[in-house]
Image (cartoon, rainbow, N blue to C red):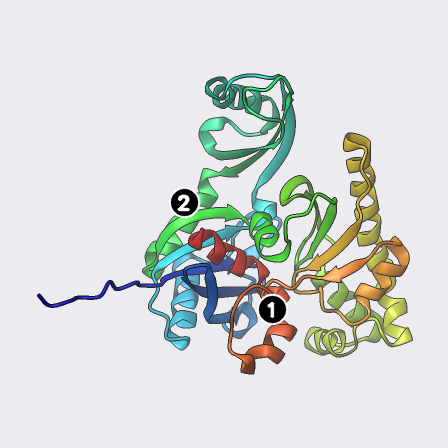
């Protein structure tokens, strides 16, 4: 009898993050508990189009689904990726987050109670949104009340992503709010309250996390693009030159520090406000801040926040638990934090 060995085929998944200024894709492969980086890539909107991929004002994709699908296919072709299964992120400003309390009840009763309560909190008819929820506090079949975190996404947004995946030839396995991808890739479970501060190009989101559960999420439109515009106006530079100055020098020269500090202080004020709100609800102090997003590596930013917030501030290390070739170490250190959402989506696929 001929012996035929078992063939263990590693699983591969794509995480796709369609941001304001760039599309980022991470391809992960898992073999048992080992997760390895197989491919990654991005495409800046400015390299192909005059418009951004997304608009905060419209809460929708600016370009057509076919244009964005074409960009995704280009990234995958360049990286020689053959994986088709994908998880896409949904930006926080396209999602609606809310918390509410429910009295103790059974598992069977809880689902209907969440739907009933959701009608009071979501500003759109339930027929126009898709909702997801999780228990932030409390246990089923116990005598303690529940704290429910509910996320609602307009069906119009979901339909767009389904269309993009179809045009790109990808199998859309799931859609997920980007904050959950950030938590998955950037934080290890801890009972100590943490602020995960995501500073993107067009919006900044302050998230309070406890034991990898999202407690509060709040977005503001002060973000990376505003910093670039501030430099451009103050130094009479075009946008490209201002962007180069921001990346090269950050807040370290005194002149740029003075220019940028009023906007950074406004972000810091949001962190303090949300931290205080969390303390009033749960009676616990936020113990540290973790920076994520494309502006997290702005030179001098971590130290500035640490001094002004009077808390330990770290820069997220999303690839810290992922295997990758040592030759990529400098690149991962420089760009890794900006790929945190895409990485979190790929990890979701492997779960």
Residue 312 image position (x, y, % from top left): 82, 57
Q: Is residue 203 above or below residue 81?
A: above
Residue 83 image position (x, y, % from top left): 35, 64
Q: Quadrant of residue 280?
A: top right
Task: Give the crowd class for mark 1: few <14, some 14-19, many >=20 residues within 10 Å.
Answer: many
Q: Residue at x 62, y 48 (%)?
A: 57
| Nearer the observer, 77 or 310 | 310
Residue 20 visible in the current orientation: no
Residue 159 image position (x, y, % from top left): 41, 45
View extreme (bottom): residue: 327
Residue 342 image position (x, y, % from top left): 52, 60
View extreme (front): residue: 1
View extreme (left): residue: 1
Assign the N terminus to one quadrant of the image.
Answer: bottom left
Residue 336's label in the rendered image is 1
Q: Is residue 122 above or below residue 94?
A: above
Q: Which residue is mark 2?
A: 159
Q: Residue at x 17, y 66 (%)?
A: 4
Q: Secondary structure at mark 2?
A: helix
Task: Give the crowd class for mark 2: few <14, some 14-19, many >=20 residues within 10 Å.
Answer: few
Q: Is residue 115 above or below residue 18?
A: above
**Relative to 330, is 12 on the left or the right?**
left
Nearer the observer: mark 2 or 1; the answer is 1
Residue 89 visible in the current orientation: yes
The Cα atoms of the two marked residues, 2 and 1, are separated by: 30 Å
Q: Secondary structure at mark 1?
A: helix
**Relative to 104, is 176 on the left or the right?**
left
């Amino acid at each position: 009898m001929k012996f035929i060995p078992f063939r263990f085929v590693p699983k591969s998944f794509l995480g796709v993050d369609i941001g304001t200024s760039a599309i980022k894709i991470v391809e992960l492969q898992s073999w048992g508990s080992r997760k390895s980086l197989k491919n990654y890539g991005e495409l800046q909107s400015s390299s192909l189009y005059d418009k951004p991929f997304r608009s905060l004002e419209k809460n929708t994709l600016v370009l057509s689904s076919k244009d964005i699908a074409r960009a995704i296919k280009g990234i995958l072709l360049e990286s020689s990726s053959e994986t088709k299964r994908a998880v896409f992120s949904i930006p926080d400003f396209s999602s609606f987050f809310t918390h509410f309390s429910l009295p103790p009840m059974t598992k069977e009763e809880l689902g209907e109670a969440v739907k009933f309560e959701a009608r009071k909190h979501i500003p759109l008819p339930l027929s126009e949104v898709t909702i997801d929820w999780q228990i932030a506090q409390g246990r089923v079949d116990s005598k303690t009340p529940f704290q429910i975190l509910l996320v609602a996404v307009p069906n119009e947004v979901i339909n767009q992503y389904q269309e993009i995946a179809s045009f790109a030839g990808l199998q859309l396995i799931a859609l997920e709010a980007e904050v959950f991808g950030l938590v998955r890739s950037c934080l290890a479970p801890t009972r100590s309250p943490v602020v995960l501060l995501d500073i993107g190009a067009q919006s900044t989101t302050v998230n309070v996390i406890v034991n990898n559960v999202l407690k509060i999420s709040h977005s503001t439109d002060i973000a990376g693009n505003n910093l670039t515009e501030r430099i451009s106006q103050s130094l009479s530079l075009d946008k490209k030159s201002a962007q180069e100055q921001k990346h090269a020098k950050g807040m370290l020269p005194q002149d740029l520090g003075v220019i940028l500090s009023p906007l950074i202080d406004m972000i810091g004020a949001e962190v303090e406000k949300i931290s205080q709100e969390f303390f009033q609800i749960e009676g616990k102090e936020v113990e540290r801040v973790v920076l994520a997003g494309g502006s997290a590596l702005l030179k001098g930013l971590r130290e500035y926040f640490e001094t002004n917030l009077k808390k330990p501030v770290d820069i997220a290390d999303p690839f810290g638990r992922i295997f990758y070739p040592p030759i990529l170490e400098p690149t991962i250190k420089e760009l890794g934090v900006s790929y945190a959402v895409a990485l979190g989506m790929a990890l979701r696929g492997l779960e």
